[in-house]
Image (cartoon, helix red, strand yellow):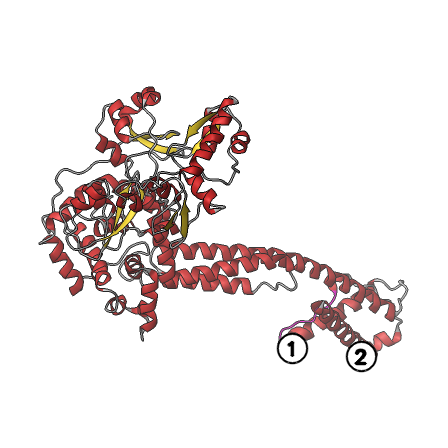
């Protein structure tokens, strides 16, 4: 609108000046005074144009041409009537105003196209910046992002609101790309953005000497084991867009041993502690520990490393955090008086000793792998991957039974399914890996393999006393030396230290084990028993040759929960005889009794005797929240 008004104002000024000039020429010409002129309305193309040039001669020439044109029109049309001068001016202004409006509308339409072109141009600059970043040309990438931002600033979102959302999206994209480039600035110092720079300082040189010297055998054996796992690791790293060099991290972590366990309780190929494994989706229960699964733990490690790299911005710091935890690294960074991203080795000096060795050791591994001939490293017999097929199994069976039926060694199935802690499938559906060449045999014999139920063991915590030995503890708790050493991650020949607490796997409980013989209560006698650590109603009932129900009735217990120091009244046989008489009366009416076994539940018992669950609970004065115990007698029909 402003441009339109300006054009109209200039046209009025020009027309006024032209009319005044024509009038002066007419007044000074004697021929014009002698005759009455007849003017012809000029064509739009013959209208004089006000030039923006500073050439005064050009303007004068234009005006003179207009005057001569008017004179020629007067001579050639002597008989035309003379229009009113005011009407002529109004007509000219209307035509010029119409033309200016048409030009303004065309300009507005062209502006919309220009804005869309600017949006497209900004996106192209962002894509080009990404390509420059991938090639390691950070300055070129930043320059293109600056140009893209300047381009979208030219779009006036207030006038053209339809471009507002696109403008904001591109602005967000540009800011995100700039942050990524600055975060990766240290990564591309010695190579491309997806590489880990190798710094050969004194710390790294010392680790190179150690791995090619005293630990040479370990290094070569780790390389042989790596052949089984690296193909999968490399494929997943490529999908995630992470450097391929990270595939050598398990060599430093575990030596590519899937059952490696550290003093800090980190387990598996990638050495996850339980809490970090749980954070990244690794299940851990009595039957399985997915930290031992090379495929699942690899996916968790990739997620963890991506998170650390996004947090710290460079791989050396991210690897340090992978070893000692991101919180420890962040605390060290806060204590730094310099910008840690400028020099990782300043940060390295203040990290824990293990981590201070960890990163140089990894960099030394990368250097050795790039120069195997130089260090005369030769791989012997590699551990090749095992081809397998996966089947969903919905019953609980032992790996040793499967191995026997399909004709393979149990160790083969254990290597394919390392997450099974005890070589036993869990009760819920499980994806079992079977060697590819034995898949058909397995499908034909799966129904013949016996089902095994093995409830989770009970554990007893024993504080080691002077003179205790593993064999003595195994005999005392009716277990084996191997079971105790496996649970506590100690060698069977290792000495145990007085004062240390050991976890003892046992089907029985400590309170039951310490009791040399059951104590029978004399009829009519009432004993008081103080609950100790590890006690439960079932063990107490077995110790005094009674039932859990008798103890609950005598002590008016609403639940089976006990507390240490709680006093329990243990009654004589009188209560038991009363219960037996009640059962006998019911038996005469056609009912019978059932003694609860380990692993039973009210639902399973009711199903066994073709009863409804509600009927079983009603006969025994139980509800759906009641618990039953081994040795308890229930009435069934």
**Magenta highlight range:** 47-53
Q: Is residue 51 magenta?
A: yes
Q: Which mark is residue 24?
A: 2
Q: Quadrant of the N terminus?
A: bottom right
For image coordinates 52% across by 36% down, the residue present is 621
Where is 443 relative to 541, above or below? above
- Mark 1 lies on a secondary structure that is helix
Q: Residue 2, image x and y in percent?
A: 70, 69
Q: Pick the residue in front: 546 or 220.
A: 546
Q: Kindly report the distance in space between the C-alpha atoms of the residues bearing marks 1 and 2.
A: 19 Å
How crowded is the residue under tag 2: few (<14 C-alpha within 10 Å), some, or many (20+)?
few
Q: Which mark is residue 56?
A: 1
- The answer, for residue 257, to whether it is visible in the render is no
**Is 109 on the left or on the right of 582, as rendered?**
right
Name the magenta segment's main secondary structure. loop
**Is 608 on the left or on the right of 449, as rendered?**
right
Q: Residue 289, image x and y in percent?
A: 32, 43
């Amino acid at each position: 609108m402003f441009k339109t008004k300006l054009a109209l104002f200039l046209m009025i000024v020009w027309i006024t000046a032209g009319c005044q000039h024509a009038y002066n020429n007419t007044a000074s010409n004697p021929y014009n005074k002698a005759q009455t002129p007849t003017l012809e309305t000029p064509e739009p193309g013959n209208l004089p144009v006000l030039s923006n040039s500073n050439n005064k001669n050009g303007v004068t020439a234009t005006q003179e041409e207009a005057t001569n044109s008017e004179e020629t029109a007067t001579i050639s049309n002597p008989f035309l009537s003379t229009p009113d001068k005011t009407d002529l001016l109004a007509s000219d202004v209307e035509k010029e105003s119409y033309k200016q409006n048409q030009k303004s509308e065309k300009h507005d339409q062209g502006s919309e196209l220009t804005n869309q072109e600017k949006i497209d141009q900004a996106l192209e600059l962002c894509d080009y910046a990404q390509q420059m970043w991938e090639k390691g040309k950070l300055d070129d990438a930043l320059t293109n992002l600056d140009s893209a931002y300047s381009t979208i600033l030219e779009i006036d979102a207030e006038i053209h609101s339809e471009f507002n959302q696109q403008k904001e999206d591109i602005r967000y994209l540009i800011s995100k790309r700039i942050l990524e480039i600055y975060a990766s600035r240290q990564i591309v110092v010695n190579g491309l953005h997806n590489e880990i720079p190798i710094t050969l300082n004194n710390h790294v040189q010392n680790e190179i000497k150690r791995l090619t010297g005293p630990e040479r055998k370990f290094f070569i054996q780790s390389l042989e084991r790596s052949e089984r796992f690296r193909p999968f690791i490399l494929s997943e790293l490529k999908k995630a867009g992470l450097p391929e060099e990270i595939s050598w991290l398990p060599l430093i972590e575990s030596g590519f041993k899937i059952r490696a366990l550290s003093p800090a309780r980190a387990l598996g190929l990638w050495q996850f502690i339980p809490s970090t494994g749980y954070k990244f989706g690794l299940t851990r229960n009595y039957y399985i520990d997915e930290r031992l699964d090379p495929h699942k733990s690899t996916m968790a490690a990739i997620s963890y490393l991506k998170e650390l790299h996004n947090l710290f911005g460079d791989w050396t710091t991210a690897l340090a955090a992978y070893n000692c935890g991101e919180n420890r690294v962040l605390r060290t960074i806060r204590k730094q008086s310099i910008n840690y991203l400028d020099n990782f080795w300043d940060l390295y000096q203040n990290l824990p000793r293990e981590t201070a060795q960890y990163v140089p050791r990894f960099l030394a591994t990368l250097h050795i792998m790039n120069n195997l001939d130089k260090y005369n490293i030769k791989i012997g017999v590699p551990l090749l991957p095992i081809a397998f097929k996966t089947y969903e199994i919905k019953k609980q069976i032992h790996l040793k039974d499967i191995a026997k039926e399909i004709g393979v060694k149990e160790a083969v199935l254990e290597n394919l399914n390392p997450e099974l802690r005890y070589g036993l499938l869990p009760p819920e559906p499980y994806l079992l890996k079977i060697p590819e060449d034995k898949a058909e045999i397995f499908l034909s014999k799966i129904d013949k393999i016996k089902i095994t139920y093995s409830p989770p063991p009970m554990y007893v915590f024993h504080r080691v006393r002077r003179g205790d030995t593993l064999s003595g503890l195994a005999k005392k708790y009716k277990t084996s030396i191997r079971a105790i050493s496996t649970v506590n991650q100690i060698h069977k020949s290792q000495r145990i230290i007085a004062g240390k607490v050991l976890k003892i796997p046992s089907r029985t409980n400590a309170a039951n084990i310490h009791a040399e013989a059951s104590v029978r209560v004399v009829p009519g006698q009432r004993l008081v028993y103080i609950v100790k650590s590890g006690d439960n109603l079932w063990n107490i009932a077995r110790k005094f040759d009674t039932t859990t129900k008798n103890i609950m009735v005598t002590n008016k217990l609403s639940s089976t929960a006990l507390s240490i120091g709680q006093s329990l009244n243990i009654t004589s046989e009188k209560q038991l005889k009363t219960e037996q008489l009640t059962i006998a009366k019911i038996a005469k009416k056609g009912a019978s009794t059932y003694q609860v076994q380990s692993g039973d539940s009210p639902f399973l018992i009711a199903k066994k005797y073709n009863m409804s669950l509600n009927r079983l609970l009603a006969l025994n004065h139980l509800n759906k929240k009641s618990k039953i115990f081994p040795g308890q007698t229930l009435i069934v029909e």
